[in-house]
Image (cartoon, coloured by chain):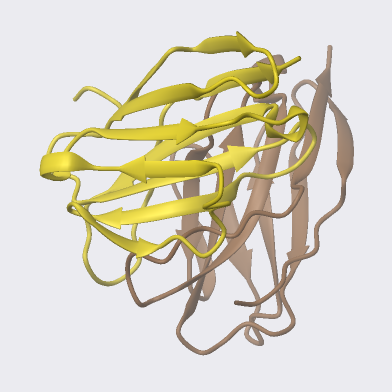
Chain colours: A yellow, B brown
Amino acid sequence: EAGVAQSPRYKIIEKRQSVAFWCNPISGHATLYWYQQILGQGPKLLIQFQNNGVVDDSQLPKDRFSAERLKGVDSTLKIQPAKLEDSAVYLCASSFRTSGTYEQYFGPGTRLTVT
Amino acid sequence: LAKTTQPISMDSYEGQEVNITCSHNNIATNDYITWYQQFPSQGPRFIIQGYKTKVTNEVASLFIPADRKSSTLSLPRVSLSDTAVYYCLVVPYSGNTPLVFGKGTRLSVIA
């Protein structure tokens, strides 16, 4: 079974530029998450999708971050304009259960460096 | 969500058993205890999950006392490849709840 795919794996941009990350979840997984992981810390949720609808985006900095999941499969996370503090690893995860305890499957992440 | 507390770091020699304890004093009745492992440059990976007593799989064992206010992840005979960050999380039995990660425990296995 193929895992969660993310691209690019690494990205370096200057502050005030824009950047986009792509995620392809495991086939059949209805729930998709984007997490931000700053060096030395655990991942922090940015946004959660159930199919193509947003379930939780309370921690997403909406003035600069946006995300979409068209057709309930792939997802794109965008930052515009980027700030130095956005330097982090952006992780995509997916899960398939709609109730009960469940396991989340994470992709390898995209390491963003903002200079 | 119940807050978890675990040691920041641990060191162990190869071949030893490693026990990482996590406290979660405010765990709710319908919460499960879940552990994830993260290697450098990779996303976290599910290791084990339990509700009470003991759970064992091919990777680890999880011990949960009757009051469920703490849990212990046990890794038998660790090797260098077990060097990673281990996260203890409390997950409600309500489905599709985002995981709330702390800083985890950085385990270093020494030859």
Camera-nearest residue between A70 and B8: A70
Task: Indicate the quadrant containing the N terminus of chain B: top left, top right, bottom left or bottom right.
Answer: bottom right
> What residue appears at the point 32 percent right and 70 percent down from the top-left corner?
B95
Image side of residue A23 versus residue B67, left or right: left
x, y percentage for residue B11?
A: 89, 31
Camera sees residue B82: yes
Q: How many marks?
A: 0
Q: Residue at x 61, y 32 (%)?
A: B38
Q: Quadrant of the C terminus of chain B?
A: top right
Q: Position of residue B103 (x, y in %)?
A: 77, 48
Q: Is residue A23 above or below residue A94?
A: above
Q: Measured from the top left, where is residue A40 in percent x and y? A: 80, 35
Please give left or right for residue B6 compared with residue B71 in the image. right
Residue, x 38% and y 55% (percent of image)? A48
Report the side of B59 relative to B4 (left or right).
left
Which quadrant would residue B90 be assigned to in this image?
Answer: bottom right
Up the image or down, A27 lies above or below A57; here it is: above
Instruction: Provide residue A61's location: percent of width, then percent of height.
Output: 58, 51
Choose between B89 and A5: the one closer to the eye. A5
Residue at horizontal 65 percent and vertical 56 percent from the top: B88
Q: Quadrant of residue B96?
A: bottom left
Foreground of the two, A26 or A87: A87
> Is residue A4 in view from this perspective?
no
